[in-house]
Amino acid sequence: MNNFIPNSRFAHVRHFVLMLLALGVLAACSTALPAQSRGPVQSRGDDSDSAATELRPGYAPTYADLVTFSLGADLVAIVTVDEQAVFPPERAPDVPAGRVRLYLETLTRNLLASNTAVGESLIFVTDTDREADGDAPDLEERSYIIFANRIAGRPGEVQLISSRAMFPAGPIIEERLRRVLRQLATEGAPPSVTSVRDVISVPGNLVGESETQMFIETQSGAPVSLSVIRRPGMAPRWGVSLGEIVDSSARAPERESLAWFGFACFLPKELPDSAFLQPDRQSQARARDDYALVLAALGPCERRFS
């Protein structure tokens, strides 16, 4: 598909597309399809010509990617590309060599999240890699998960929220995404951590006994704290308290939960000197060790697309 309007089926949109091009609207709303989505894939397991593929583990979006995109999008949908048109180079001068800009008309297969209803079709523009032979890829009849925002005053048109917010659909990613959306619907957005405000660490009566409390600053002002308790002969225990009162029985958040996302992805890498309420180095050193324990237990916030 190398022509801007590849066949007669596009006669009804030619005038519309050219008009928007003249206004610079489509170019301004274009986003890039992630190159990784054209990389290693696994089959959905059926033999139909329209069978979609999805990214293999190690190349697929992470939990942090899915939460980030879900929080930032007006709508999350599974769409099937119905028709596509290729922008000629002169109409997409900002597209690098080896890539191509596509105008896509898609059918809404499944609306996973949206604050308002959407029509049965969605239109958007995206950039993607050319095939090895230089041709534009044929995306027709393939299904994708998109994270997008509506375009004011233009019903049926959307803009991907990121140059990387479009992924081949398939049962694995769909189930992972549905889990994230269920969490958001049930729990709401996690507290947005901005810094560690106050830190205090006190020794106990026994050798090796201590408790450290770290009070977290959040964007909303919601009270959040971390506590680390050490007892002789026992593994250190840490937990999260969401409220004014520090709960000594608080537990650590489960991995791939919204609480885990909030801390693993936004806690600073080390405690700021300004956060310590105690001037003695011993207390500060103990607090730093406990904070390192928390970060190690949380593990890295892995991102591939967001």
Image: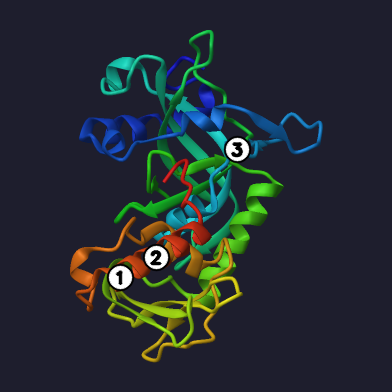
Marks 2 and 3, how far apart at CA: 29 Å
Query: As displayed, is residue 158 above or below residue 189?
Result: above
Residue position marked by numbered label 3 in the rendering: 58
Count of numbered circles in the view:
3
Residue position marked by numbered label 2 in the rendering: 291
Q: Residue at x 54, y 79 (%)?
A: 231
Q: Amino acid at mark 3?
A: Gly
List the single residue furthest toward the front.
207
Q: Nearer the viewer, residue 2 or 137?
A: 137
Residue 303: x and y in percent read 46, 45
Instruction: Kindly tell me whether residue 276 is visible in this rendering.
Output: yes
Task: Tell me the SS state at disc 2.
Answer: helix
Q: Is residue 39 left or right of residue 10?
A: right
Upstream in the sequence, badge 1 or badge 2?
1
* Quadrant in the picture for residue 23: top left
Q: Is residue 43 left or right of residue 82?
A: right
Query: As displayed, is residue 189 above or below residue 57?
Result: below
Query: As displayed, is residue 17 above or below residue 210?
Result: above
Q: Amino acid at mark 2?
A: Tyr
Query: As displayed, is residue 256 above or below residue 122?
Result: below
Residue 206: x and y in percent read 48, 84
Upstream in the sequence, badge 2 or badge 3?
3
Residue position marked by numbered label 1 in the rendering: 282
Marks 1 and 2, how far apart at CA: 14 Å
* Quadrant in the picture for residue 111: bottom right
Q: Residues within 10 Å of mark 3 (few under 14, many from 20)?
A: few
